[in-house]
Amino acid sequence: MEKRILLTECADSTGLIAKVTQTCFEHQLNVVRQDQFASAEDSKFFMRTVLEGDFSCQDSVIRKLEQILPEGAKVRLNDNRRRRLCVLVTKEAHCLGELLMKCYSGTLNADIVCVAGNYPVLSELAHKFDVPFKLVSCEGISREEQEERMMKVIDEANADYVILAKYMRILSHEMVSHYPLGKLINIHHSFLPAFMGARPYEQAFRRGVKIIGATAHFVTDNLDEGPIIQQDVIKVNHRYDPEALAKAGHDVEQMVLLRAITKVLDDKVFIHGNKTVVF
Amino acid sequence: MEKRILLTECADSTGLIAKVTQTCFEHQLNVVRQDQFASAEDSKFFMRTVLEGDFSCQDSVIRKLEQILPEGAKVRLNDNRRRRLCVLVTKEAHCLGELLMKCYSGTLNADIVCVAGNYPVLSELAHKFDVPFKLVSCEGISREEQEERMMKVIDEANADYVILAKYMRILSHEMVSHYPLGKLINIHHSFLPAFMGARPYEQAFRRGVKIIGATAHFVTDNLDEGPIIQQDVIKVNHRYDPEALAKAGHDVEQMVLLRAITKVLDDKVFIHGNKTVVF
Amino acid sequence: MEKRILLTECADSTGLIAKVTQTCFEHQLNVVRQDQFASAEDSKFFMRTVLEGDFSCQDSVIRKLEQILPEGAKVRLNDNRRRRLCVLVTKEAHCLGELLMKCYSGTLNADIVCVAGNYPVLSELAHKFDVPFKLVSCEGISREEQEERMMKVIDEANADYVILAKYMRILSHEMVSHYPLGKLINIHHSFLPAFMGARPYEQAFRRGVKIIGATAHFVTDNLDEGPIIQQDVIKVNHRYDPEALAKAGHDVEQMVLLRAITKVLDDKVFIHGNKTVVF
Amino acid sequence: MEKRILLTECADSTGLIAKVTQTCFEHQLNVVRQDQFASAEDSKFFMRTVLEGDFSCQDSVIRKLEQILPEGAKVRLNDNRRRRLCVLVTKEAHCLGELLMKCYSGTLNADIVCVAGNYPVLSELAHKFDVPFKLVSCEGISREEQEERMMKVIDEANADYVILAKYMRILSHEMVSHYPLGKLINIHHSFLPAFMGARPYEQAFRRGVKIIGATAHFVTDNLDEGPIIQQDVIKVNHRYDPEALAKAGHDVEQMVLLRAITKVLDDKVFIHGNKTVVF
């Protein structure tokens, strides 16, 4: 029997779980797992329901739910086809390498359809895994022009998600707003909101922190302030200079990015204002 | 409005979530939070539902659910009164101390109504918090007699849960079976199933492990093999001798025991064979 | 045989370890353990040496080391007498409770000689452990006057360290500079430098972070910017409201503060500018 | 100036640190970092000293140390040339993939000179990184013969270390004793000594543990009982079936193996009986 994931998002009110599960039951779709959350501060309701059954009734289920749920409800029923990823990089190999490896081994339910970088160094790595690499250099052209070329590359890749895997450029308002919120995922090399901005490992060294971390988040206009999907940390000590901090940080970065993308691909992440609900 | 927790446990079948939530909806009880799990290997269904509303309909809800759920379903509707704890100890203060403190400060929704020990050393600590201490020494009497006296103390305490907070005695089959499964909670000073049995820190030292841990579990006849509620670990290294391992372990023990009891008091723990479901 | 700890701090140069260990060897003091660190950015040398032997030669050792080490070297030879702690509190019990318990059980090599608070609520808890409580209220008096009274209480306690165990007042420049750097230790209820300032759990909630933490640091003039001794974190998720974040945070706070004080009492912490070296 | 690492291992006695550092000082070799450990239970002394200077005096230093240190002392002075790794695999890609990636990116100071497997599936991955793959199948030949062929492959690779990166064969006494202790490193897919033997994730599932882990260790005759180099864990819950446990475990396995090898390549690991000293 097929499995699909029903994602429900609406204003909170009484009886929502009963309405959704009753509708599924009537369409002979069995609930395998259900997670739900209602926010206290703004009364939003989020539910992820794993269903099993015959989905020829799909349109009828969605139509029925849109009728009985509060106005403005968003209802989606996702299949589990492999998603398409476009990965943006600069010079560092670890995040790209981990994604290539996990797509190659089948651990990630996705294909990297394109790697695009502002430097050519990672083209060799992409090509090892038979993934096309597009160089979109910043040399000799304006920021606007570079971004336009990059957007063209991304659009041609026809990707479900764009992963900024240590792409060391700040995206302009124009570029961010070109994509729907939730499509661009960034790995930030610090435990946000500590050490926002440039050179976080240098900042961490100067501050003498005992723990460093990494943050995967959706990209919004406000640099380093998009909804956080995943964070993790490792312990460090006085022996770590900025270079050692960066090296230790790379392990966390690649792990946090991988986990965030896994959650997103499993349809376990809802965006809730500038925060996320992650089931 | 009052909040209560509905606990449902039965054989898995289709439509269970719909049936339960529909019944609550009909009784005008709103679902604040719901967690559910169905085991693949033996098709058991577990659900915890936080409800809000007027519970004068309580009996009617339970009767209805018992009718429509699969035969043998267990349905409970718990209020959040403070539970009564009886704590068994030997000589070590850290776990008892943490429980006394957290009950005193109101962090744990429970009262320690009695501390019972086979040595007198911790009576002073119990008395600081105005908790009666019962000495049930092993000196000069048989194991059976000591256990009988201890069971008498426990029974008189009229406790909801009996916490073995580093009580260094192995309970007999007779004593364990005197209580319903789920009433006795033990903290074991190792990361089970590693280092079962006596002197786990000595064992850990000899094996040269790099991580030690603690395990909180329900007590069953099979020593160290009851359903695990909570586990945690800390990193150690070659500098730790057995004494240092034990000292480091104490921090984990008190934290793991506290978290396990918090989960149990929040009605978030189901027993599932020799395992647990912890929401 | 007695054990003592030799603490050496000076400008880095060649042969320092040889000079120190040779001097100890000549005085028939055996090195049980030695940790050393030289900072690359400003060439400072820090060494902690655990010695075993007959310390009647103590003055001779120190005099010799001061002669042969670079000018300005600081050399101390600490015995392991129980240190005296003065604990400052406001209303929250968890950090004070943990310190009282660990001093009571002998886990911390220290005595709490005085608890001082700007509210009376924790006097009962201090008295349970036979520790005097001094109320230094802020009511009806100026900040200067309250601080003067508090400093008088602290000075009369004749304490080695002053622990700010959730003392929710910002110390003035005058009060901070009244004490040598390294004497005042604070627990900050966030993972510094994230969420500096007031209400960090409220800030963490609004930002939607997936991890919260705590920071123990020496107090300096720059609020929340003193040298960090210890940090730790726990994972949280969208279900945590500010109150739940605070409750979860309390466990980390008490653990981080305890570990920081343990390190300080073991003479394992050097201050290095606005950072620390922790062996 | 060149840096090298001096490794000293001998019976413990007084003045060892003074003797070693004095000797280095006399040869104008500066100590950049030093870590030392003396075991209480069997009085063994281990020291790792990072030296900086002109090493043309190398032979003289070692000769002098062998003279003045206790009889039987082992003294080595290692340069930091890239080491040669031979990696043994079966079918799972994650550990091999991580090692290939980290050697490729220069994070590991090593080259994988050969991958050998008892199945052909990972040859494609090895070839992507231009590493030769040798198939040493078990089909149709005796265990002895397969091991002989494998040893021939390993010996021809002229490797410093042999990494069993999820090589799912138990090595015979003959094969293990063919190599010096410390040359063979294995990643075991459980938190040893829990779940020794086959199918640890299945065992972990049946036991209902809340944490799973991985262990990197040197290989000895006693399966799963060699000296542990590195361990780490992740939290799991009742929702993890054996397959999900294995998938979660893979992340820990690859991380633990990478960290263990990093420590070994940095000459930070001493073998001490069936334990290790890891600086």
Image (cartoon, coloured by chain):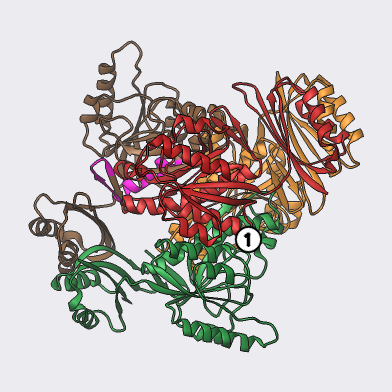
Chain colours: A brown, B green, C red, D orange
Q: Is residue B2 above or below residue A120?
A: below
Name the residue tied to disc 1: D193
Percent x, y for residue D31? 74, 27
**Secondary structure found at label 1:** loop
Q: What's the magenta region?
A: A255-275
Apparent side of residue D157 relative to residue B55 in the rendered image (left or right): right
Q: Could you tell me which quadrant the C terminus of chain D lies in?
A: top right
Percent x, y for residue C29? 84, 39
Residue C155 or A239: which is nearer the viewer? C155
- Label 1 resides on the chain identified as D
Residue D266 or A136: which is nearer the viewer? D266
Percent x, y for residue C59? 81, 33
Q: Could you tell me which quadrant the N terminus of chain D lies in?
A: top right
**For the residue carrying disc 1, how many other residues have a C-alpha within 10 Å: few (<14), some (14-19), or many (20+)?**
some
Q: Is residue D203 visible?
A: no
The residue shown at (67%, 66%) is: B199
Percent x, y for residue C236? 38, 50
Tell me which amino acid carries mark 1. Pro
